Image (cartoon, rainbow, N blue to C red):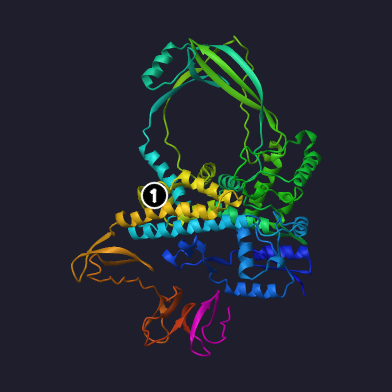
């Protein structure tokens, strides 16, 4: 019997790790979080505000058996290793496991691995530590903040508007989308013109007049300039300059989500799900291995071992000249837990070698991650940039071009980053060129573009709203809540989204804004670094937040329910659409004086004639919402089945024959109709 128990989050990860550790270790999974805040107490927060925000945790629905099994495993083991994910969320899960399972301080070790490969897993077990309670406090503070803001504001929105929820990060992300839509609606397009000189093998654009930048506001101005131009242009200058083109750094969570959206058409939720699978382990022949490092990170750092391995690979496959340099970040703060960037666990596991073991989508994402990392360590590409300045009656025209002279990192990254040559002719200063034509063109200024998923993630990252692990959830929530729609991959706020944002801004503009949310993230980072007291942060927040909530409950105008155009048959008042626990329903607007509720007539879907009576078998819905089929003469005829009925009776027992997974069988006995 193994005496060492290892607890991880994911079942698939547990299988991979157990293979590495051998039979002295038993690896089990908690299947994520096992506990969460209760929904009892004041406002259902599960937090005792008066007792310094003391949280009350309860098992998550469906996790009691898992907790019971884990307790049994703990009792049977001498040593417990908590091997949850290497971030604040993972640290908190380890603490919850320790606390809920009654594990003593001397009975456990905390191990972290950023990649699931045999060497790294063994190394992690050789270098364990204890739980970092500062990280736990940071995560717990985030959870309490999100619970207070989410519950209080969601309840407010549900009682006063058509909105379903609000949240600390969610509502700020929605505000960005609503604000952008208003910018677009208020945008006033302005006319402007351009003038181009067309030559046989290139064209040049007017940009300057008598050493001043020129702007052409109307066709009259354009025509005046055209009347002053001749066909002949003097080559004023020809300049050539060699420029370096640098590879981008390896992926962090947000840039991976952005590139997967732009290049692979994956939404953030799908990208993170695929990345999770690549991280947890893929069966590759006789081995199971994680193909990428941990996918929730703010850091572009690469390990020295990986850099050394990659440089050797570049030298062996492309030559010494293609070896580049390590990209570093200017941004020093907010780097989550000193993770590495998202990279392949081995440079030798090329996408081509891994392709037979991966689904199409897993392969696409792995290929993107692999070549982004490899390119980041390769030499800069070099281009020869040429600029030609032409003069015509004091008007200056410019033509630019560039030619790739050394591919560098584009040797491996050309499929993901286009570099097109634009060649200019070989001409000399003081040459006179005759234009084939000089043309004017009308333009209009364009409003700012709506956010795509990739652009919204980029904006949230740059503004410091949320953290990498939250972006996918936040975006998915505002879509699910019907606050936005997607059109051409761009976010458009719905009327409900606009109304929810406006109501929140009327009462919570000091809290639901970019600056406050970003500062809160900084406070959470400081708690993790033991530079800020978590209780102090919570008290400071609540002292300003709760008075605003109470004011909003008292003063926010309630949205009138939508009228149907019908009158109540009992009292004559208008019927309105209301929302209840089980969805929308039509009722009297004079409630509670009149409690009339309109019975909705559901369209009956007839399937076949009932073979047991003169009725029809129709589609019905059970109390739990599951579809079944039964006779419309119920309760006189009790013929019913979960499978689609055929309308025939079983020759053996005279019960209903049904279609089950393509086979005709009896709904009662074991009879199966033979196929011809």
Q: Is residue 354 visible?
A: yes
Which residue is label 1 attached to? 508
- Residue 483 visible in image: no
Which quarter of the picture shows residue 26?
A: bottom right
The residue lying at 31 percent from left, 64 percent from top is 578
Camera-side residue of 114 and 254: 114
Q: Main secondary structure of the magenta part?
A: loop
Location of residue 372 (image quadrant):
top right
Horizontal arrangement in the rendering, residue 313 relative to residue 168 (left or right): right
In the rendered image, the vertical position of residue 260 relative to residue 70, given as above or below = above
Q: Quadrant of the C terminus?
A: bottom right
Image coords of residue 505 (percent x, y): 38, 48
Residue 448 higher or lower than 526, as above or below: above
Out of 10 and 641, give the one closest to the viewer. Answer: 10
For the magenta stretch, what is the residue range?
649-676
Q: Nearer the viewer, residue 174 or 418?
A: 174
Residue 620 drawn in magenta = no
| Secondary structure state at the residue bearing disc 1 | helix
Can you give x and y, in whole percent of width and height, for residue 307 in the image?
75, 43
Total marks shown come to 1
Q: Is residue 651 magenta?
A: yes
Q: Position of residue 486 (x, y in %)?
A: 45, 50
Furthest residue in direction left, as rendered:
572
Q: Nearer the viewer, residue 211 or 76?
A: 76
Height in image: 234 above or below 562? above
Query: What is the crowding at mark 1: few (fewer than 14 residues within 10 Å), some, or many (at least 20)?
Result: some
Q: Position of residue 554 (x, y in %)?
A: 31, 57
Q: Residue at x 43, y 60 (%)?
A: 151
Indicate the quadrant containing the N terminus: top left, top right, bottom left or bottom right: bottom right
């Amino acid at each position: 019997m193994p005496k060492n128990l290892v607890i991880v989050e994911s079942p698939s990860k547990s299988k991979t790790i157990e293979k590495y550790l051998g039979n002295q270790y038993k690896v089990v999974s908690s299947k994520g979080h096992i506990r969460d805040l209760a929904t009892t107490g004041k406002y259902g927060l599960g937090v005792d505000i008066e007792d310094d925000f003391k949280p009350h945790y309860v098992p998550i629905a469906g996790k009691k058996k898992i907790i019971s099994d884990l307790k049994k495993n703990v009792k049977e083991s001498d040593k417990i290793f908590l091997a949850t994910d290497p971030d604040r969320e993972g640290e908190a899960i380890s603490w919850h496991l320790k606390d809920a399972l009654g594990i003593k301080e001397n009975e456990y070790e905390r191990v972290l691995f950023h990649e699931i490969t045999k060497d790294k897993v063994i190394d992690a077990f050789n270098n364990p530590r204890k739980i970092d309670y500062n990280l736990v406090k940071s995560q717990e503070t985030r959870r309490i903040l999100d619970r207070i803001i989410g519950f209080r504001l969601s309840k407010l929105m549900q009682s006063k508007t058509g909105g379903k929820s609000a949240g600390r990060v969610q509502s700020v992300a929605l505000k960005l989308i609503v604000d952008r839509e208003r910018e677009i609606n208020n945008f006033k397009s302005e006319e402007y013109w351009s003038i181009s000189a067309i030559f046989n093998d290139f064209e040049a654009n007017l940009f300057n007049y008598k050493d001043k930048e020129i702007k052409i506001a109307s066709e009259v101005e354009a025509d005046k300039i055209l009347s002053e131009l001749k066909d002949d242009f003097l080559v004023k200058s020809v300049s050539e300059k060699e420029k370096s083109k640098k590879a981008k750094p390896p992926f962090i969570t947000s840039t991976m989500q952005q590139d997967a959206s732009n290049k692979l058409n994956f939404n953030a939720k799908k990208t993170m799900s695929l990345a999770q699978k690549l991280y947890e382990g893929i069966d590759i022949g006789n081995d199971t291995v994680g193909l990428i490092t941990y996918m929730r990170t703010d850091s572009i750092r690469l390990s020295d071992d990986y850099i050394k391995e990659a440089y050797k690979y570049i030298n062996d496959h492309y030559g010494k000249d293609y070896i580049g340099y390590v990209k570093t970040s200017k941004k020093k703060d907010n780097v989550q837990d000193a993770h590495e960037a998202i990279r392949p666990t081995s440079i030798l596991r090329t996408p081509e070698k891994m392709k037979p073991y991966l689904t199409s989508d897993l392969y696409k994402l792995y290929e993107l991650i692999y070549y982004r990392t490899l390119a980041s360590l390769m030499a800069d590409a070099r281009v020869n940039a040429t600029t030609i300045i032409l003069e015509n009656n004091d008007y200056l025209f410019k033509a630019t071009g560039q030619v790739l002279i050394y591919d560098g990192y584009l040797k491996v990254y050309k499929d993901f980053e286009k570099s097109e040559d634009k060649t200019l002719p070989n001409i000399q200063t003081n040459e006179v060129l005759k234009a084939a034509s000089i043309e004017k063109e009308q333009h209009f200024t364009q409003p700012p573009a709506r956010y795509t998923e990739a652009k919204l993630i980029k904006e949230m990252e740059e503004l410091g709203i949320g953290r990498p692990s939250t972006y996918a959830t936040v975006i998915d929530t505002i879509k699910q809540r019907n606050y936005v729609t997607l059109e051409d991959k761009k976010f458009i706020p719905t009327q409900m989204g606009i109304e929810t944002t406006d109501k929140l801004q009327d009462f919570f503009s000091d809290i639901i804004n970019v600056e406050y949310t970003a500062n809160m993230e900084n406070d959470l980072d400081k708690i993790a670094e033991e530079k800020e007291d978590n209780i102090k942060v919570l008290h400071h927040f609540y002292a300003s937040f709760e008075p605003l909530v109470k004011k909003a409950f008292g003063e926010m105008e309630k949205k009138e329910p939508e009228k149907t155009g019908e009158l109540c048959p009992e009292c004559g008042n208008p019927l309105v659409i209301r929302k209840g626990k089980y969805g929308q329903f039509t009722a009297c607007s004079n409630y509670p004086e009149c409690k009339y509720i309109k019975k909705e007539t559901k369209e009956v879907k007839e399937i076949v004639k009932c073979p047991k009576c003169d009725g029809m078998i129709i589609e019905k819905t059970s109390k739990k919402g599951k579809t079944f089929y039964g006779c419309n003469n119920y309760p006189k005829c009790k013929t019913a089945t979960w499978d689609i009925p055929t309308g025939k009776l079983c020759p053996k027992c005279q019960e209903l024959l049904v279609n089950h997974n393509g086979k005709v069988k009896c709904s009662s006995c074991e009879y199966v109709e033979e196929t011809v």
